[in-house]
Amino acid sequence: MNIATASERPTQAAPARVERFDVLIVGAGISGVGGAYHLRTQCPGKTFVVLDSLESFGGTWLTHRYPGIRSDSDLYTFGYRFKPWVGAPIASAAEILKYMGEVIEENDLARHIRYRHRIDAASWSSEDRAWTIDVTRTDTGETLRFVANFLWMCQGYYRHSEGYTPQWPGMDRFQGRIVHPQTWPEDLDLAGKRVVVIGSGATAATLIPAIANDCAHVTMLQRSPTYFITGRNANDLADQLRDLEIPEEWIHEIVRRRILKDQANFTRRSFEEPEVVKKELLAGVRAFLGPDYDVDRHFTPHYRPWRQRIAFIPDGDLFRGLRSGKASVVTDEIEQFTAQGLLLKSGAVLDADVIVTATGFNMNVLGDVAFTVDGRPLDVSSTVGYRGTMFTGVPNLAWVFGYFRASWTLRADLIGDFVCRLLRHMDAKGAKVVTPTLRPQDAGMPLLPWVDPDNFNPGYLLRGMPALPRRGDRAPWHHTQDYWSERNEFPAADLDDGLVYR
Ligand SMILES: Cc1cc2nc3c(=O)[nH]c(=O)nc-3n(C[C@H](O)[C@H](O)[C@H](O)COP(=O)(O)OP(=O)(O)OC[C@H]3O[C@@H](n4cnc5c(N)ncnc54)[C@H](O)[C@@H]3O)c2cc1C
């Protein structure tokens, strides 16, 4: 992982034109578009702009174009609180983009968003009480400058330009093609090809059934198994309510509550009775694969359920592919790449024409932007998070980092409300600057990793953790990743506790 790239860029010469806004939102993904909606509706007097380096909105759902790309959360909770979802719970990237497009159109947000604007640097000046943001237009190379009082970082958690590919010996010898799902080539023709997908997470599980019918054979090569949960891509409660012609706004709210209750129950059970939950999950897999399949070897993880995200397999499509013989699973480790494919640690050989590295992301903290605060480069890892959304010593900046176990957007909406409340609070106080600052009683507070690695530990997070802020052991410095406590804590947060105004 490389988080120093942006800070190594040379400082730009001042462009002729400078634009000023109250708030600048970085990113037009689900969080940034949500942020724009919340500002429009909750702080109508504020001027704002949304900048994104991509050519359109959508973030994750625009970047990822591999076959089958879809959500693994249900869209009743991944969708915004304020815009009903009316389709099947699991949605394709195209359906999510359509939904986001409607949000932009219905709320007249397009005029606030500028695409192909990459933010390279952001410097806070206490004297000016503002951020200066240096931007490069990715289409023309032109450099631009913006000044904003408040920065709302909605840049997600991984670098969009490239995925994470581990380096294995012999990769340069391989005569076929190596592809990362994050940069899926448009010209890739899989007809008649032997494909190996390295990885066992949601991306591999989505991709494999989507390509199984096109290629000669697809093998999922995994070092260790992952938990999967199977089910119909339908929501019975939503269907019943629709049958009764209940308004979509009500259906959205009722179904969200039902799903969130069920998820909370499932998470609680994963901690309280992990063996029972494990049995249930494996029974779901066995129901598709039959009694002769080696579920112990290929689908029984070594960790307890929910330490990593559990991928949803709608209608068991991955397992149907395995049963049909068009796909298979190998649980082994790569010794090295060869000219024809892969040599595994067991001595087995996997021949391949195309190798897909579904090996995850390069986590990037704060969008690879070179931050300075009053001339000093900002090292986020030396700060303490305020409710997992602001940082000690960093004025007028909020970051949206969603949930792992629940839909990302639930937290994006909570933070949206919080930021708008904070901006209104500043106005009421006549303050231009708000800075999270440890209180006297926090002296000596133990500083913990951003997320408890014993609680949740996917690879990208463990790789990225050293660059992330620290976490305290008490409010407002903790970061619980628990929707059920945060949905009460954020609206009730005392905005004069741990925040210093000027
Ligand atoms: C394949 C895949 C499937 C996923 N499925 C789910 C799911 O089902 N449920 C779930 O909850 N989560 C899921 N996630 C996590 C997902 O990333 C988030 O849920 C969510 O889409 C993140 O939205 P975001 O707007 O915060 O960030 P992103 O979607 O990452 O968007 C960030 C935007 O910021 C822009 N940006 C970043 N840095 C800069 C910069 N310096 N200058 C200008 N622009 C910048 C990027 O171009 C991008 O458009 C998935 C992730 C992936 C990769």
Image (cartoon, rainbow, N blue to C red):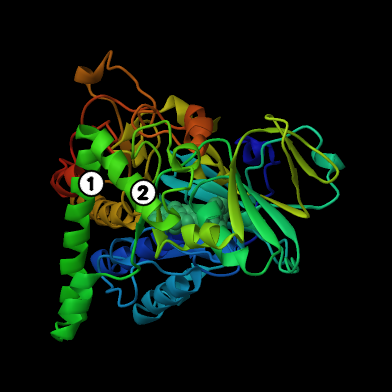
Image spot of residue 75 (x, y percent): 34, 66
- Residue depicted at 31% across the width and 34% down the height: 436
Q: Could you tell me which secondary element the residue under label 1 belongs to?
A: helix
Q: Is mark 2 within 8 Å of ligand 1?
A: yes
Q: CA distance from mark 1 to mark 2?
A: 19 Å
- 174 to the left or right of 49: right
Q: Amino acid at mark 2?
A: Gly
Residue placed furthest toward the top: 444
Q: Is mark 1 within 8 Å of ligand 1?
A: no
Q: How many marks?
A: 2
**Pointer 1 residue:** 266
Quadrant that contains the C terminus: top left
**Pointer 2 residue:** 402
Mark 1 vs mark 2, foreground winner is: 1
The answer to which quarter of the image holds residue 49 is bottom left
Residue placed furthest toward the front: 292
Q: Amino acid at mark 1?
A: Phe
- Is residue 146 shown above or below 465? below
Q: Nearer the viewer, residue 127 or 257?
A: 257
Quadrant that contains the N terminus: top right
Residue 19 in view of the camera: no
Residue 32 in view of the camera: yes
